[in-house]
Image: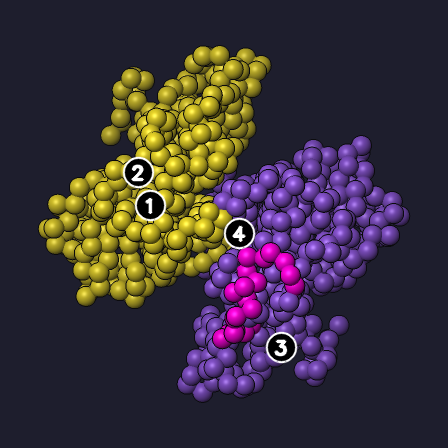
Chain colours: A yellow, B purple
Amino acid sequence: MRPHLSISRRTSRTPFSSRVEAAGATGYTVYNHTLLATSFRGIEVDYWHLCENVQVWDVSCEKQVTLMGPGANQLAQYMTPRDLSNAQVGRCYYLPMCDENGSMISDGVGIKINDRHWRLSVADSDVLLWAKGLAVGFGLDVEVREPEIFPLAVQGPKAEALMCRVFGDAIKELGFFAIAPFVYKGKRMKVARSGWSKQTGFEVFVNDADIGTQLWDELFAKGQDLDVRAGCPNLIERIESGLMSFGSDMDHTTTPFEIGLEKYINLDADIESLSLPALRLHTPTKKLMGLVLEYHRSLSDVNVFVGDQKIGDIRSQAYSPRYMRRLAFVMCNLEALNGAKTVAVNTDQGQATGTLTSLPFNFEALGLKACR
Amino acid sequence: MRPHLSISRRTSRTPFSSRVEAAGATGYTVYNHTLLATSFRGIEVDYWHLCENVQVWDVSCEKQVTLMGPGANQLAQYMTPRDLSNAQVGRCYYLPMCDENGSMISDGVGIKINDRHWRLSVADSDVLLWAKGLAVGFGLDVEVREPEIFPLAVQGPKAEALMCRVFGDAIKELGFFAIAPFVYKGKRMKVARSGWSKQTGFEVFVNDADIGTQLWDELFAKGQDLDVRAGCPNLIERIESGLMSFGSDMDHTTTPFEIGLEKYINLDADIESLSLPALRLHTPTKKLMGLVLEYHRSLSDVNVFVGDQKIGDIRSQAYSPRYMRRLAFVMCNLEALNGAKTVAVNTDQGQATGTLTSLPFNFEALGLKACR
């Protein structure tokens, strides 16, 4: 099925949509009520280009939820089991966001702007409503908003070179997950060394639509010799890199332990986090694992078996042209799996077997060599 | 632009998706993280068919948020400025849902299942998170969930005839916005006389995917002579009928007064509603109005003018083949509008003028005759 997407004001266009279209986007999804391209020249061509050059992504769909006021730190801490008591101004923190049962509400990056101001860059989930509900219910002195900010990601190994041409060499001093203000055409905009790929890069938090489109055009004008292209989060790259997508790989029925986020859960911290009491008592019964298959084509049946027993289901999948294997994320029932490593899936050409592995994929340990 | 929609687990398929595809859906949108068809044979053909026959709609995207427990009534009342103190079991209530500032969070239908159980049928907004946040923050004794329910709408003038063939003549006794349990293949499912059209009809709250698909098939088998077709909420019909869409015609920046929902706001009621204190002090500065244009084609520029002054912007629009006019919903700035009725819009063929009117459209008062 390759259906057409009907667009309305409810599925918002962005300040960059006309440029994304002009650049030849061929597939779209809707993310946080906003258009997000999924492909330009085909995800394999886009993949190689991203891994070897530089791309500019319209990720306006990455909604920003701001918590401002004396209660901002308290509300941010309520929302995540990660200990934020030593969080530093000007730093980004990956945050699982969990409810009072320890289940995932969303995930994303929290940015500590100052002691009374957090900004959350959220996955496809109206975190605004969750944060507002908590603020109103707990009577916190904090204003929760979703300001008009349109993140633009510059990703790929040549991202730093391109960013320096536009923002100057000060970009080089920005450490990983650091954020700082930069001035572009007289407008202060925050820039972070971050982004939803493992190819390194930056996110520019555009706060002015007109200046944002000028920035888009300048990135392309100054990056011609770097073969800069319009791009988007790439399915192959994110699966190879073990980047999980809220709504696909996890949802409201998943705890952070079940998707390998242990290191972001400070069980022993003396903090007021809504989810910690439940997470302290939690024993995971399922686990997201990697699956490596020699089968090339897309699997339409998501069931995964050991013998006749279903042990899990596929959440995301892509063919890796680099390792020449189909890779998938599988949510496994730990009791049914019982430690098995070899599993089977149904394909159009009969059953295929594959190997389960922990995430992120360790291709070397799996004996897989990159073809390029 | 007619882009392709990329589908992932995050943009959920439904138990009926394969049937919707087989029936020839040509356009889709994503609504509450779920696929929703937008067109089958083209929206004009679909429109006439809906107004004259009967259609079955997969509206699984109409998420159901349940509030269960001793605090259910209190939480439901917090969420809306409509007085629910005399709400009856087994009745549906249209509800604006507003935050503490009086702004729209969502809208939808609240169903009082019993004194400790409300179910909210919500628009494209994660109302689950808002309700959960309030419940946790206020410490209410209520469980908030989004159960696996897949609403199926049967809409159109022949809907009652078709429903009687499947569920029996008891369907006739169901009054408008009443809801009652019916048994289908041994499974109890609630049926309401409701739906997102003004062509009359029903919604079946399917709570079992397998039995739901059997129901789909039986509706088609028994409705052949009624020319039953797969359908979907129809843009033309909903605009002609004055049905507003959350995210397009209203959003978090809109109050219910600004979209004509006065009759659902009980300003004088002695109830605990989060939004009433703000709404009591609120003076609307904008208003959603209808626009009637002789121009046929879609308007790409959403700005609406009186002379050189911009007075508002188009939120939704469609060409009505019945009245042979383009109809639109326009959010007007009341001060800039200053009572004007004749406005101008930019088209590909220069400016076109049109008439502003209150909503819902009163075609007779506008001097417009139906052509069919």
Residue identified by numbered label 2: A84
Q: Which of B57 and B270 is in front in this view?
A: B270
The image shows a total of numbered marks equal to: 4
C-alpha distance separating marks 1 and 3 = 46 Å
Tags 4 and 1 touching, CB below 8 Å: no
Which chain contains the residue that carries disc 3?
B
Q: At numbered mark 1, what does the secondary structure look like: helix, strand or loop? A: helix
Residue B74 among magenta residues: no
Residue numbers of the magenta segment: B269-288
C-alpha distance separating marks 1 and 2 = 8 Å
C-alpha distance separating marks 3 and 2 = 51 Å
Residue B214 percent coordinates (x, y): 74, 36
Residue B280 among magenta residues: yes
Residue A70 percent coordinates (x, y): 33, 52
Q: Nearer the viewer, residue A184 or A318?
A: A184
Q: At numbered mark 4, what does the secondary structure look like: helix, strand or loop? A: loop
Residue type, label 3: Ser
What is the number of the mark on residue B268? none
Residue identified by numbered label 3: B358
Tags 1 and 2 touching, CB below 8 Å: yes
